[in-house]
Amino acid sequence: MNEYDLIVVGSGPAGRRAAIQAAKLDKKVLVIEQGRRVGGVSVHTGTIPSKTLRETALNLSGWRERGFYGRAYRVKQEISAEDLRRRLLITLDHEVEVLEHQFARNRVQHIRGKASFAAPDTLEVLKEDNETIHVRGKSILLAVGTTPFRPDSIPFDGKTVVDSDELLEIDELPRSMVVIGAGVIGIEYATIFSALDTAVTVIDPKATILDFIDREIVEDFTYQLRDRNMKLLLGQKVDKVERLDDGKVLVTVDTGRKITTDMVLYAAGRTGATDTLKLAAAGLEADSRGRLKVNPETFETAVPGIYAAGDVVGFPSLASTSMEQGRVAARVAVGAIAKEPQKYFPYGIYAVPEISTCGLTEEEMKERGIPYECGIARFRETSRGHIMGLDTGLLKLIFSLKTRRLLGVHIVGEGATELVHIGQAVLNLKGTVEYFVENTFNYPTLAEAYKIAGLDAWNRMGELPKEAPVATAQRLDTTATSADEAAAPEKKKAASK
Ligand SMILES: Cc1cc2nc3c(=O)[nH]c(=O)nc-3n(C[C@H](O)[C@H](O)[C@H](O)COP(=O)(O)OP(=O)(O)OC[C@H]3O[C@@H](n4cnc5c(N)ncnc54)[C@H](O)[C@@H]3O)c2cc1C
């Protein structure tokens, strides 16, 4: 039987980063992936395809230019599913090639097959040709990710009633679409299709959406969605989904409302892909949603030597955080020093418009009793915004009144997922409002909104107290022991992709 220092099950962001990290530390590493190609959900059905689709939709629809040329402006009049797929395939091929090259360069072995436990240190791999092999690992990392939740009551057919994986395979763009589930995936796809002129209705039993995002940002966002005629049926439950003889789908809502639509996207949750792992043979058990419990610092499960990382361990279920978890798990597994990932990480929602956020929301500031001041900038206040024809876009900064530190950055609008990193850096480096007031920003840029929002807050916060000259502002904050520092780090975001 072949033996390895680390065996990784799954080649998504967590598995890939873990494998390469262990290989860089001169360990013998094997990756087992059941999919036809490496890359995981992230490359094949999740992050990369949805973001490629978004980019294609925005480019072909001329969305970004409509501020200037009006709502009727289009780059391509008839956009087809084939237009969307073409760019997708090129992007995916490139991603897979980069990943395969990384594996080859770092001497990470990988085999195609379905892994399950034969013993706590041994995996059985069912290969494509039905051959079964056994491999043993000093450590094993489960980075198996999740699959879409598909309740029996929904008549999925892969064409008119689809989950988020199947959506990428559709032959025709629907003229109308009902999205069930207003989580991040549901909202992203709903707004992308709406930008393609599909009439979209979103239904969710909860009365509010994106509860982990600052309310002011969500209000601005939902206003924009309604302004372009998207229907948000919140606090309403779907009773029944029926496929009709004419190819349409009938959705009945608990209020009695009936909606006939071309397509239903069911995007109400995902389940950990642990059902075929034969966890019992390793002494492990998953929770009711297929997820595994780990030590949050080491990513080790209850069984020594078996680790889990990425979406299978639950919150925050992002490609970005999965990569970091995989890296930390691999370092712990092979006995290297591992530092915990930074506490403040950004959250990106690639809807149309984008939302991105890092740190505490205004609601969390209130809950924690931290005195604060907010600074707001609208993109239309920046020259870059004028050049780009932006009439929407909002950046909000939240500062502690005690320490003057930036504790939250929240953005909705063009480039939000890139812009957020400026705020993230200031936040993690314990910067204060003075950073934005005293520094020069490139002009004209959207980043200038930071300066405007900083000044907006600073005007109400007033000058630094005399006894604390400007140059000592940073020191003042790093030595502070107020409730801010104690409370700031971990944010219990209930959301996951
Ligand atoms: C539509 C959508 C959009 C998203 N957008 C974003 C985004 O914009 N930004 C972001 O950060 N995140 C996004 N995510 C989340 C992101 O894709 C996940 O957080 C990430 O893919 C999780 O990585 P992972 O390593 O845990 O596993 P995954 O990427 O889920 O990969 C797991 C792999 O394990 C393999 N596997 C499972 N069981 C076995 C087995 N028994 N044997 C062998 N192989 C097995 C699977 O085939 C799969 O390839 C999105 C997700 C979806 C669905």
Image: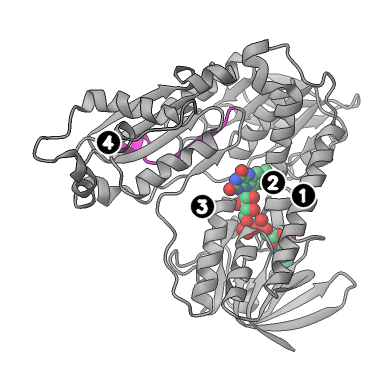
Residue at numbered disc 3: 315
Asked if the residue at tag 3 contacts the one at tag 1, i.e. Cβ–Cβ closer than 8 Å, the answer is no
Q: 132 left or right of 431?
A: right
Percent coordinates x, y for residue 286 in the rendering: 58, 64
Tell me which residue sits at (74%, 23%) in the image: 61
Of 349 and 62, nearer the camera is 62
**Residue 330 appears in which quarter of the rendering?**
bottom right
Residue at numbered disc 2: 48
Instruction: Kindly report the distance in space between the C-alpha atoms of the residues bearing marks 2 and 3.
Output: 20 Å
Residue at numbered disc 1: 92
Labels 3, 4: front one: 4
Q: Mark 3 or mark 4, which has the lower sequence index?
A: 3
**Which residue type carries mark 4?**
Glu
Percent coordinates x, y for residue 36 in the rendering: 82, 60
**Which residue type carries mark 2?**
Ile
Q: 43 left or right of 463?
A: right
Residue found at the very far bottom of the displayed protein: 1
Q: Secondary structure at mark 2?
A: helix
Region in magenta: 353-365
Q: Mark 1 or mark 3, which has the lower sequence index?
A: 1
